[in-house]
Image (tube, rainbow, N blue to C red):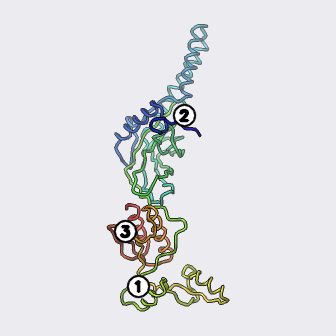
């Protein structure tokens, strides 16, 4: 695809009207208050004709001119019948969105590169059903909406839709501007609203795809076997396999070495032995120079240590998390990595 580039700045050329429209949209969005629950009132719902609506208006104008010139009574009847239907459609289309309540559920954190699932609950207190309501993420770069999801809201009930949004990088982000619109019942008018939720979303770093093995566990002071671990340079903590040990505790690397040597010895990780070692995931000892690459490797190590059931600590510039394990500890470590 060819892109026009200005000779002076080397940046892609953009039409002044498009730039002006994007600036006005940004200014308009910035004036809206942030809230996680929005009830659509008269002032927050907007309406304009669609392309089909403009074509209908042009057709009605031609019918009216032809009926006047040729004194066609049936032409008058058809013109005013269609015009009356369009006017009724304006009221029904606006009422289809007016009075609806939108509520955003707290989104779960995800890793960079993954889509955030935004669960939105639409609640209606009206005694009639609302048809054809679309929600999506408003794109400041175009006049359309991305990832539109359509739903119907039952009478005096609620409906839940899920909108996807892909953040650009790790960190804490505010949910982007959302939009809801409807074309019901004729498609000649578009009624829409703009919504700015207030809930932030935490984006963890993306884990390294082919991360190296976990670093060597440092023996605790005064523990038995400290000299052996220092000399071998391995995070050992294994024992002979016992019937009933979970498969995730089996050291398959050592099992493969035993099978290659003609033996059938299996070993499992010894939780008591591993407690004599402290596994520290250190930002300063990741082996890579780029900050994002270090965070990506630490994220992979956190997930790996948690999957193996090991106690692990995290050392970051200006912050240290003591060795522990579990869902809460993993979330704290990933949050620290995301906000670094």
Q: Residue drawn at (39%, 90%), measured in percent from left and top?
A: 223
Judge whether 279 appears above or below 90 on screen. Answer: below
Q: Residue drawn at (42%, 62%), measured in percent from left and top?
A: 291
Distance between the Cα atoms at labels 3 and 2? 57 Å
Question: Label 2 belongs to which residue?
Answer: 185
| Residues tagged 3 and 2 counted as in contact (Cβ below 8 A) | no
Which circle's residue, 3 or 2, is located before the other in the chain?
2
Q: In which quarter of the image is the C terminus?
A: bottom left
Which circle's residue, 2 or 1, is located before the other in the chain?
2
Asked if residue 60 shows in the view, the reply is yes
User: Label 1 crowding class (10 Å Cα cut-off): few <14, some 14-19, many 20+?
Assistant: many
> Which is nearer the eye, 161 or 279?
279
Asked if residue 129 shows in the view, the reply is no
Q: Quadrant of the N terminus?
A: top right
Question: Label 1 belongs to which residue?
Answer: 219
Which mark, residue 41? none
Rendering quarter of residue 328? bottom left
> Which is nearer the eye, 326 or 184?
326
> Which is nearer the eye, 264 or 262?
262
105 displayed left or right of 210: left
Q: Position of residue 262 (x, y in %)?
A: 67, 89
Distance between the Cα atoms at labels 2 and 1? 71 Å
Q: Where is residue 70 in the image (x, y as percent from the top left)?
A: 61, 7
Question: Label 3 belongs to which residue?
Answer: 316
User: Label 2 crowding class (10 Å Cα cut-off): few <14, some 14-19, many 20+?
Assistant: some
Q: Residue drawn at (65%, 90%), measured in percent from left and top?
A: 263
Disc 3 versus disc 2: nearer the observer: 3
Which circle's residue, 3 or 1, is located before the other in the chain?
1
What residue occupies the far front of the structure in this picture? 8
Q: Helix, strand or loop at disc 3? A: strand
Q: Helix, strand or loop at disc 1? A: strand
Q: Where is residue 260 in the image (x, y as percent from the top left)?
A: 66, 85
């Amino acid at each position: 695809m060819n892109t026009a580039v200005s000779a002076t700045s080397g940046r892609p050329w953009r039409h002044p009207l498009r730039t002006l429209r994007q600036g006005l949209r940004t200014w308009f969005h910035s004036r809206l208050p942030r809230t996680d629950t929005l009830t659509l009132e008269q002032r927050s719902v907007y309406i304009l004709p669609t392309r089909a609506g403009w074509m209908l208006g042009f057709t009605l104008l031609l019918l009216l001119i032809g009926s006047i010139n040729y004194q066609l009574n049936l032409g008058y009847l058809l013109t005013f019948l269609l015009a009356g239907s369009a006017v009724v459609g304006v009221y029904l289309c606006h009422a289809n969105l007016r009075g609806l309540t939108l509520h955003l559920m707290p989104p779960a954190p995800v890793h960079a590169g993954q889509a955030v699932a935004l669960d939105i609950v639409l609640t209606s207190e009206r005694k009639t059903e609302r048809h054809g309501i679309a929600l999506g993420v408003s794109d400041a770069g175009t006049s359309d909406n991305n990832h539109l999801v359509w739903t119907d809201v039952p009478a005096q009930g609620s409906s839940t839709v899920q909108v996807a949004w892909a953040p650009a990088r790790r960190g804490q982000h505010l949910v982007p501007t959302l939009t809801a619109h409807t074309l019901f019942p004729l498609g000649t008018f578009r009624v829409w609203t703009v919504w700015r939720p207030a809930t932030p979303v935490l984006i963890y770093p993306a884990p390294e795809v082919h991360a190296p093995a976990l670093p060597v566990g440092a023996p605790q002071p005064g523990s038995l076997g400290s000299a052996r671990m220092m000399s071998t340079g391995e995070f050992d903590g294994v024992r002979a396999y016992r019937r009933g040990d979970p498969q995730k505790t089996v050291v398959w690397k050592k099992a493969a070495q035993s099978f290659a040597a003609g033996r059938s010895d299996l070993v499992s990780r010894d939780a008591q032995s591993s407690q004599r070692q402290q596994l520290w995931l250190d930002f300063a000892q990741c082996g890579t120079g780029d900050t994002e690459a270090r965070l990506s490797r630490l994220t992979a190590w956190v997930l790996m240590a948690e999957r193996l059931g090991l106690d692990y600590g995290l050392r970051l510039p200006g912050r240290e998390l003591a060795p522990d394990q579990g869902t809460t500890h993993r979330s704290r470590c990933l949050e620290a990595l995301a906000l670094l």
